[in-house]
Amino acid sequence: MTEKTKSREAEKPVVAYLGPKASYTHQAALDTFNDDSYTLDPQITIEDVFSAVQTGKVYRGVVPFENSTNGSVVFTLDLFADLHNKYPGILVCGESYIPVQHCLLSHYPGDNHGSSGTPYAASSVIESPLSSGAVTPTNQEPVPQKPTARPIGDLSRIRKIYSHPQAWGQCKIFLNTYLKGIERQDVSSTSRAAELVSEDQSGTSAAISSVIAARVFGLRVLAKGIEERGDNTTRFFIIKRMGADDIVKEASKKGENDKHWKSLISFTVDHANPGALANSLSVFERYGLNLTSINTRPSGVENWNYIFFVEIKGRKIEDDEEKGDVNRALRDLDAVCRGRRWLGSWRNRLLE
Ligand SMILES: O=C(O)C(=O)C[C@]1(C(=O)O)C=C[C@@H](O)C=C1
C-alpha cells in the first residue's frame, strides 16, 4: 500500500457491525455503506457496536433489529431499553432489509481445506434415518409441517450445531425434522458459528449461516434454504450518536412527506394506573400517527413491569415541541407516561 492509499484509507469513516465478516449484518452494512468510501469494522457483539457508536469511536453502527419469521432481536431491544444509562446518545438513523437464506455448513471428514462453499450434488444425497424428511405425527402436532429444504449431504455424523439464537427460530421445521435432539450452541452471530465450525475438521459440528460464510470460511453446504419461509427477511438498524448531523434537521426530499419516515420511541408507564398504557398510546392516534409495531421488555425496576417500544410513521423535525405531529405527540406523551425517549427517525426503506 502506498503512503497516499494508506492515508486515504485512514480518512474513511468507520462503520461498526456485528461480525465477523460474512454475517448477515455485514451484508446489511454493505447495503448502506460501500467499502470504497467506508471502513467496515466487525465487532464481536451487538453491545460492542452500541459502545463503539456511543463513544464516538466510529461514525455509524449496524445492528439486527427484527426478523420477519422469528420476531424481535431482544439483545438489540435491551440495548435500546438502556436500563443502566450506558447508551444515552444512540439514535436510529436508517434501516436495511436483507433476505435471509440459511444454510447448514460443515466440514466433510477428511477435508483439509474446505470446499469453497460448493454444495454437494443432489445425486450424492446420503439418506439416513435422520434425513428421510419423514415427520412423525404426534398428539400435539397431528399434521406436522414438512421442511422446504432437504439435506444435500450426510447429516448423520453431526453432534453439535452452532448459530445465533435468532436462527434457531427461523429453521425450526428443518431442525426438528433432520437434526432433532442434536445439541445446539448459541454464539454471537451466524458467521461466528461458521468460523468456529471451520476449526473442527472432524465434520461433527455444523453451523447455520449463509452461503457467503461457507465461501469465506471454506465449509461445505449440507443443506440450503433451511429457513421455513421463502420470504424470510431481517431488518437492520443503522445507529448513530446524537450530534451535529442529526437527521432531524435533514430537509425532506421532493414529493416526500413525514409519512415516508419512521420513528422509534420507548416509554414506561405507572403500572398501578389502569389507563396508563391506553392513555400513552392514544397520543399517537390524536395526531394521526400510524403505529407500525409495539414491543415490550422487562423494565428492570420491578417484576412484571415493562418498557414499551413503539414505532410510528412520522418524523421528529426539530427541537421545537410545537412543530410537527411527532413533536406534539411526544409533548403529550410526557404528560401521561413515566418516562420516555425518542430513539430516532429515519426514512422508510420499504417505500423506496
Ligand atoms: O448477522 C448475523 O449473522 C447474525 O447472526 C444476527 C442475526 C439476527 O440477530 O437476527 C441476523 C440475521 C438473521 O436473522 C440471524 C441472526
Image: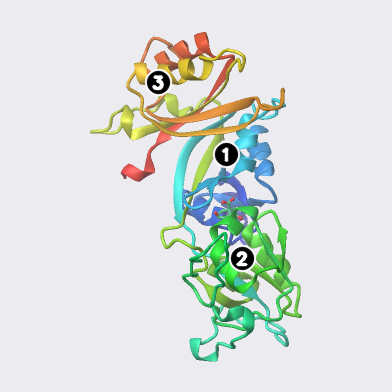
Percent x, y of residue 245 = 49, 28
Residue 350 sits above or below residue 133 on the image: above
Q: Are marks 3 and 1 in contact (CB under 8 Å)?
A: no
Q: Residues within 10 Å of mark 2 (few under 14, many from 20)?
A: many
Q: Residue at x 58, y 51 (%)?
A: 40
Looking at numbered disc 2 in the image, what kind of residue is underneath it? Answer: Ile
Which of the two marks, 3 or 1, is nearer to us in this view?
3
- Which numbered disc covers residue 284? 3
Residue farthest toward the bottom in the current orientation of the protein: 123
| Residue 13 horizontal/vertical position (percent) | 56, 43
Give the side of residue 314 with respect to residue 23, left or right.
left
> In the rendered structure, which disc, 3 or 1, sits on the residue that comes first in sequence?
1
Name the mark nearer the viewer: 2 or 1: 2
Based on the displayed image, in which of its 4 quarters is residue 65 positioned?
top right
Judge left or right: residue 322 versus residue 266.
left
Q: Which residue was labeled with disc 2?
A: 208
Q: Measured from the top left, where is residue 6 in percent x and y? A: 61, 54
Secondary structure of the residue carrying numbered label 2: strand
Task: Indicate the secondary structure of the residue bearing disc 1.
Answer: loop
> Which quadrant of the structure image shows residue 208?
bottom right
Which residue is tagged 1? 59
Which element carries disc 3, helix, strand or loop?
helix
Kindly tell me whether residue 57 is visible in this rendering: no
User: Which amino acid, mark 3?
Assistant: Phe
CA gap between label 3 and label 1 equals 32 Å
Q: Are marks 2 and 1 in contact (CB under 8 Å)?
A: no
Q: Which comes before the other along the chain, label 2 or label 1?
A: 1
Q: Earlier in the sequence, mark 3 or mark 2?
A: 2
Expressed as whole percent of the image width and height from the top left, the position of residue 136 reads: 57, 72
